[in-house]
């Protein structure tokens, strides 16, 4: 794709990655984009770079607007590989440019590049840079989602360059939210936002609330939010801010995700009457088999639901490996505001369900106890117990949901 004007001489000069399907372990079935932005002013400025594999594309896009040798300022909002690894290509073409970066960003970037070659200026929240008719305001956002992260606000145009905040992993010919919704749907975009938040930003809800409050306190008017992945929010930037605040507060659907794996189908057979019991209690339910579902997709479904039931057979007195992997991944995301329960089958000795509850308690999540276990294959009596287990769990989910 070629350069696209975002607003008044501010250009998207990034690249669309239609083919990527694995983004550091996070499945991206729709691909992604690497967004960076060129501001044409008396002293042209480039905000962020792109993943190194796409350096030629961003260089071509920059050249379509300006000779890179004229660039005087390069802002690095985030040093992760998909944003900063083409910085050396940019600096080769823009040798007179100054790099603006946080102190933690400078230290981190120094692990990848010889910084002695470049003129680097460390910035912090409240620092500004005048590039002619425009003023750039820097806002540090540590742990959104790396320690080095910051955002850049273009005062005169009311544009917030938000790095990984407010992004989505979507490869699309649409550069803006209204274009995407016109081609596809608002629900598809919302789903991509939730997917991105659940797998990347879930641990940082309190920080997100604090940073949005800080932006409001600074009195920043925002017409456009331009993230480093996915579409640019121009039709209603307040919409994505509201979505983030809702997610940071732990908003979820009144529903249950049954996330399970099975060895000889017994745990799978338990999941069916459990789901029936949940549905008959008036609560929505989705059943997800782990080995048939990418981890990031299961995490998204967990996050969307107020309640989650984990189904696991016992293997060597422990949880089934795929279930243990899921809970280990979930624990790292530090979820809040969810209620958990567990069920499963066993042969000569149990242990998996007990271990699942130990994991829930480590995560400090509300739990529904006791769990439910059956020996070998569920009998008709066991299936009735499963159905009742599902109904009782759904009742607790409704109680939990009423608190939010």
Image: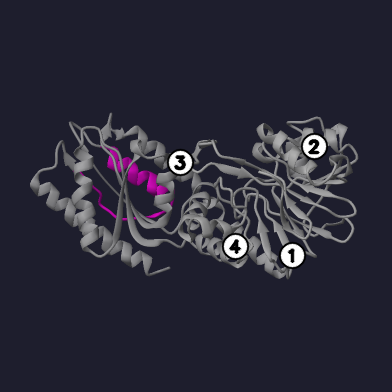
Left or right placement of residue 171 versus residue 404 in this view: right
Query: Toward the viewer: 383 or 336?
Result: 383
According to the image, label 3 marks what residue? 329
Return the disc, 2 or 1, that comes first in the chain's sequence: 2
Q: Is residue 355 magenta?
A: yes
10 Å crowding of disc 2: few (<14), some (14-19), many (20+): many
Q: How far is disc 2 from disc 3 in space, using C-alphas?
A: 36 Å
- Taking the spot 34% from the left edge, 35% from the top edge, the residue there is 291
Residue at disc 2, secondary structure: helix
Q: Which mark is residue 158?
A: 1
Q: Which mark is residue 90?
A: 2
Q: How far is disc 2 from disc 1 in space, using C-alphas?
A: 26 Å
Q: Nearer the viewer, mark 1 or mark 4?
A: 1
Return the disc, 3 or 4, that comes first in the chain's sequence: 4
Return the disc, 4 or 2, that comes first in the chain's sequence: 2
Query: What stretch of residues is rendered in magenta?
Result: 351-373
Marks 2,1: beta carbons within 8 A = no
Residue at disc 1, secondary structure: loop
Q: Nearer the viewer, mark 4 or mark 2?
A: 2
Q: How far is disc 3 from disc 4 in space, using C-alphas?
A: 23 Å
- Taking the spot 40% from the left edge, 42% from the top edge, the residue there is 327
Q: How far is disc 1 from disc 3 in space, using C-alphas?
A: 38 Å
Query: Toward the viewer: 300 or 387?
Result: 300
Marks 2,3: beta carbons within 8 A = no
Return the disc, 1 or 3, that comes first in the chain's sequence: 1
> The C terminus appears in which quarter of the rendering?
bottom left
- Taking the spot 89% from the left edge, 44% from the top edge, the residue there is 70
Q: Is residue 274 magenta?
A: no
Q: Report whether residue 85 is seen.
A: no
10 Å crowding of disc 4: few (<14), some (14-19), many (20+): some
């Amino acid at each position: 794709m070629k350069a696209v004007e975002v607003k008044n001489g501010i250009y998207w000069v990034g690249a669309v990655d239609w083919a990527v399907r694995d983004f550091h372990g996070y499945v991206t079935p729709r691909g992604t984009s690497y967004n960076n932005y060129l501001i044409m002013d008396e002293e042209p400025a480039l905000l962020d770079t792109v993943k190194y594999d796409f350096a030629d594309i961003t260089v071509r896009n920059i050249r379509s607007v300006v000779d890179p040798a004229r660039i005087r300022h390069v802002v690095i909002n985030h040093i992760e590989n998909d944003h900063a690894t083409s910085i050396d290509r940019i600096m080769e073409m823009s040798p007179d440019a100054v790099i603006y970066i946080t102190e933690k960003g400078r230290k981190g970037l120094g692990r990848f590049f010889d910084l002695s070659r470049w003129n680097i200026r460390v910035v912090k929240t409240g620092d500004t840079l005048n590039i002619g008719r425009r003023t750039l305001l820097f806002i540090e956002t540590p742990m959104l989602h790396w320690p080095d992260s910051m955002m850049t606000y273009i005062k005169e145009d009311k544009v917030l360059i938000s790095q990984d905040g407010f992004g989505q992993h979507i490869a699309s010919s649409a550069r803006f939210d209204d274009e995407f919704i016109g081609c596809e749907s608002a629900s598809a975009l919302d789903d991509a936002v939730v997917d991105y938040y659940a797998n990347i930003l879930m641990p940082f809800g309190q920080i997100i609330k604090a940073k949005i409050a800080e932006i409001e306190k600074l009195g920043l008017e925002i017409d456009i939010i331009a993230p480093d992945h996915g579409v640019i929010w121009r039709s209603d930037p307040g919409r994505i801010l509201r979505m983030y605040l809702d997610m940071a507060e732990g908003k979820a659907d009144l529903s249950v995700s049954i996330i399970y794996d099975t060895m000889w189908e017994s745990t799978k057979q338990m999941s069916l009457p459990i789901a029936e019991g949940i549905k008959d209690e008036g609560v929505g339910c989705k059943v997800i088999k782990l080995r048939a579902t990418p981890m990031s997709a299961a995490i998204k479904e967990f996050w969307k639901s107020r309640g989650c039931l984990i189904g696991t057979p016992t293997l060597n007195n422990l949880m089934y490996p795929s279930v243990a992997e899921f809970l280990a991944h979930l624990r790292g995301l530090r979820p809040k505001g969810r209620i958990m329960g567990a069920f499963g089958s066993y042969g000569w000795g149990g242990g998996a369900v007990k271990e699942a509850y130990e994991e829930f308690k480590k995560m400090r999540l509300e739990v529904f106890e006791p769990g439910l276990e059956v020996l070998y294959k569920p009998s008709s009596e066991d299936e009735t117990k499963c159905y009742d287990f599902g109904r009782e769990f759904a009742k607790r989910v409704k109680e939990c949901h009423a608190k939010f």
